[in-house]
Image (cartoon, coloured by chain):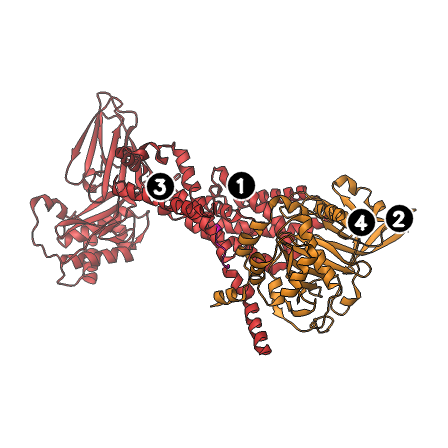
Amino acid sequence: MIFSQLKELGVLGINNRVGRYILRHNNRANYPLVDNKVFTAERARAWGIAMPENYLVIENYGSLKNIDIKLMTYDSFVIKPANGSQGNGIIVIKEVLREERNGKILLRFRRSNDKLMELDELKHHISGILSGLYSLAGQSDTAIIQQKIDKHPVFDKYSYGGIPDIRVIVYMGFPVMSMVRLPTKSSDGRANLHQGAIGAGLNLSNGHTNNAVIRNQVIDIHPDTQHTLSDLQMPFWREILELAARCYDMVELGYLGADIVLTPDQGPILLELNARPGLGIQIANLSGLVPRLEKIRLEAPENLLARERVDYSMKHF
Amino acid sequence: MKKIIPYITASLILIPLLILLYKSQVLKISLVPQMVDDVWEFHLSVRPKGVVKNFSFPVPKSGQGVRVTDEKFKKQGYTVFSDTNNDSIVMTWASKEPIIRRVQYTARIDIKPVKYKVTKDTTESYPNGLQQYLLTPTLLPEDEEAIKLLEGAILEEKETKTSAIRKIYYYMEEEIQRNTDIKTIHETLITGKGSPLIKAKLFNILARRQKVPARIVVMVRLPELKDEAKAKIRFTFANEVFLNNKWIPVDTNRGYFAERPDSFIVLHHNYEDIQNMISRKNVTYKVHAERVRVNKFNRKEYSKEVAKSESFFSTFSLYKLPLPLQTMFTTILLIPLGTLVLSLARNVIGIPTFGIFSPILLALFFKETSLGFGIIFFFAVVIIGIGEKYILDKFYLLAVPRMSILLTLVIILMIGYSFWSADISFISQKHLSFFPIVIVTTNIERLSIMIAEEGVYSTLKTLLGTLFISLLTYAMLFIHTLEMFMFTNPELLLTIIGLLILLGKYKGYRLSEFIRFRDLVKQRKLKDEKKI
């Protein structure tokens, strides 16, 4: 019976995740800190946690009027909804094209998938964000124009298109499981498992891939780059885990998903936090979360510093 | 807190059940009202033609399968008296002055289908009272010849009365076509066609010639539900034959032998007696029949029953509410049951849906309109939504006006449908049906985004999930017994809360997670085997 097999492997189901971990440990009042990326950024600045720079925060339709003047100064950027989820509503602009016509400068934007966007389209997308098209509950939202992160060279062979990110599940401040999400052609360059990105489980002890899946199927090589996935070693591994562990202190959510990106110059920085991280990470690692969560709950010492919690996790998981 | 939850849950579930037990065992109240059949409000108005001071007209009488109650005559200054024989009633209105106004008769008629089993019959002689039903009229010689020929063709020499009648019935039903223009026996014998009355007359003659007492009954055909309002009701005719010592109905026009469906009310059992009374030469009449209760539970009786129990429940019963509120609550009380289905489907099975309660609202919408229309409407809106997405995307409209355009398009769709089907009854006057329209509409925008973001496959899954749960809830809404059960025993709502707490506490896997983590289990095994 597959039920008992799931139980044996300690696979965490949705009901269990919500009932036993999220509702118990995540205080609803702290949700806006992670759901709204503007708040996360403010809090992170205060805590000295590095995040991509927010160039502009657009809160109302009025600010859309002269947006081209503001955007003119940037060569690349990312547009995202402050309250978005699962990467919905995010557009990556890798190049801003300036064209002079009749003394006016016209802007056009090249997206990460090489499609060209007119200024009007861009404005339309932002107004869609403002009206709440992509927000979690459909309420009106804020749009963020953010610094575009460049790909760390270590991923050159492992990623197609966009920027891979590292998901770390943090329970009571202890990293418990991790994976790296590698964009593929079929995911349209996005690091989103639903859309067909690769999820590669990472050993907490050393940051080395232990397994990789694409849409629930185990794979050995990247379908687009043809490179073996089993020899990916994450640089700055300890720093990544410490960054994730510190997020617990920052937002005080007991069950948390931290999305971290590696930059070529700054090292690991926090991209966003998630109060309801998905369960697909278990498939990427081919192991269940429950034994690890229960070990922390029952055995782990309390009142440790982030650094000490990372030590614990690296030793035990 | 953790410890008392099970107790709270258990009491929530059990207390209403105990109340039910108390009601049924101690107070002896039934848990659901009794079912009642269609009851008809029968209305007859008659006016004699010419200058007369009295006239007669048949009215329905209680009997096999028929119960006539609440008979009312508007006296209007007439003297009214009735002449009752075994089967029928003829009313007579009399006045000192010539009758110029219509006279009115109303009654409630509860009618059930009747069916007889007819066995062999070889009766030789009949009592005097039946002799009149054996007389045959004098026919034209050539008609006489034709009938003899016919009898030779369809009957064998020695037949029991039952089998002879059966054969005549089959012949009349199969071979004589219905044609209201043919009005004499002579024509019918030549053309093989006949009006209902002529067919009944011919059957009567054929039966009597076999020495079986037979008569023509005058009936009113009750209108179907859909054309109840506009149907003009006329008298129609069938026969009765005396077999096995009782009168057996035979209808060669509609094809019923030894049975009478509940769509006919017999006005009089012997046409010959009243032939002149109902002739259009002598009177004008109007018949109107309307269903007052359509196979419904008898709420009135039940509220009496509850009141009689003189318990707490006689004061706090939903049956005490005004009728419109009662009707509303009958539907509304099913919503919690719907949420139970929904919670089960989402949290235990793991069926994805758009929004949380939209499946239930959709189900209500289906109920308010009709399932066929509901589903067509749902998919039409989905298609409009997707089309709108592709077309209006190029307009760069803000989200709210855009959604409003969608809503307006939906309303245009409704207008279009009404014109196309020329049927406005698909949406009832209740405002309830309009909320789902809004719900459906607002979900569409999310639908088009979902298609763009998560792909057609997963959107389709969610769409079908929503529809599936709606249909499940819809099916539940149609179990009248369930509806009445909840309405009669609203304390069961507490049980539902209890069950919902149980569901809310469920931390096990969802059925959908079997599929989701199936590969995890399989591949983990493979990997472990490799290691070993």
In the rendered structure, does residue B365 fall within the stretch colored magenta? no
Could you say which chain is coloured red in the image? Answer: B
**Mark 2 and mark 1 in contact (Cβ < 8 Å)?**
no
Tag 1, which secondary structure?
helix
The colour assigned to chain A within the rendered structure: orange
**Magenta segment, principal secondary structure?**
loop
Which amino acid, by three-letter code, is at mark 4? Leu
Left or right side of B399 for B6: left
In the foreground, B372 or B223: B372
Going 66% across and 58% down the picture, which residue do you hit? A309
In front: B228, or A98? Answer: A98
CA gap between label 3 and label 4 equals: 62 Å
Marks 1 and 4, how far apart in space?
A: 38 Å
Q: Residues within 10 Å of mark 2 (few under 14, many from 20)?
A: some
Q: Find residue B220 and report its image quarter.
A: top left
How many labels were placed on the picture?
Answer: 4
Pick the residue in front: B469 or A35. Answer: A35
User: Does the image show residue A191?
Assistant: no
Q: Amino acid at mark 2?
A: Ile
Residues at circles 3 and 2 in contact by the CB criterion of under 8 Å: no
Nearest to viewer (mark 1 / mark 3): 3
| Disc 4, SS | helix
In this rendering, position of residue B272 left or right of residue B324: left
Q: Which residues are magenta?
A: B504-509
The residue indicated by pointer 1 is B435
Residue B182 vs A282, above or below: the answer is above
For label 4, the residue is A119
Which residue type carries mark 1? Phe
Q: Position of residue A273 (x, y in %)?
A: 68, 53
Q: Nearer the viewer, mark 3 or mark 2?
A: 3
